[in-house]
Image (cartoon, rainbow, N blue to C red):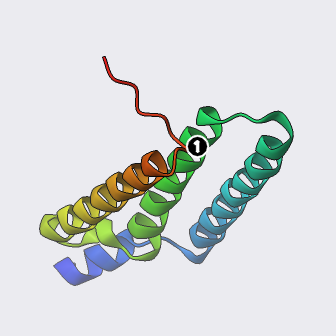
Amino acid sequence: MTAEQQNHEAHPTPAQYWKIAALLAVLTAIEVSLFYIDRELDLEIFNAVALIGLSTLKFIIVVGWFMHLRFEKPMLTRFFTAGFVLATALYLVLLSALGVVAVRGG
């Protein structure tokens, strides 16, 4: 068996793609629910942290499974990770500047 055949066998099956799609749909439904729950209960920081955590999880699932990043060279994984970390940091700075997330000093 060649290396190409072994790599091809490691890819997800169509059934696995459907399961991943269902998981992403459930995570999206949770995110939408959190938005509406926050409007009623005013969860503030909990809601922001939960939404950022869910978006991180969805990013990892999409990049790892649908983009097949786990089969690529480690340099590509570091590239996507660095981009996500920088985007998240920028998002948190923006939320802080707008007063959505309070930055508490020691």
The N terminus appears in which quarter of the rendering? Answer: bottom left
Look at the image and tell me whether residue 2 can be seen: no
Res 9 seen here: yes
Tell me where residue 71 appears, x and y as whole percent. 27, 70
- Residue at point 43% right, 50% down? 97
Q: Which corner quadrant of the image does residue 91 belong to? A: bottom left
41 left or right, relative to 12: right
Q: Residue 89 at x, y = what percent? A: 33, 52
Q: Residue at x 48, y 34 (%)?
A: 102
Graded by Cα atoms within 10 Å as few (under 14), some (14 to 19) or many (20 or more), the crowding at tag 1 reads some
Q: How many numbered discs, if any?
A: 1
Q: Is residue 101 above or below residue 60?
A: above
Q: Amino acid at mark 1?
A: Ala
Give x and y (percent) for residue 20: 60, 64
> Quick one: 69 or 34, which is closer to the camera?
34
Q: Nearer the viewer, residue 36 or 23?
A: 36
Quadrant of the rendered image containing residue 23: bottom right
- Residue 38's place in the image compared with 79, above or below, is above
The outermost residue toward the front is: 98
* Residue 48 vertical position relative to residue 21 in the rendered view, above or below: above
Q: Nearer the viewer, residue 4 or 44?
A: 44
Tell me if 52 is positioned left or right of 88 in this view: right
Q: Residue at x 18, y 78 (%)?
A: 3
Q: Which residue is mark 1?
A: 48
Q: Quadrant of the C terminus?
A: top left
Residue 104 percent across, percent down from the top left: 40, 25
Q: Please identify the residue farthest to the right as the structure is shown.
A: 40
Kind of element beneath mark 1: helix
Instruction: Determine whether, in the image, residue 55 is placed left or right of residue 21.
Output: left
Left or right: where does residue 51 sit relative to residue 31? left
Camera-nearest residue between 24 and 100 = 100
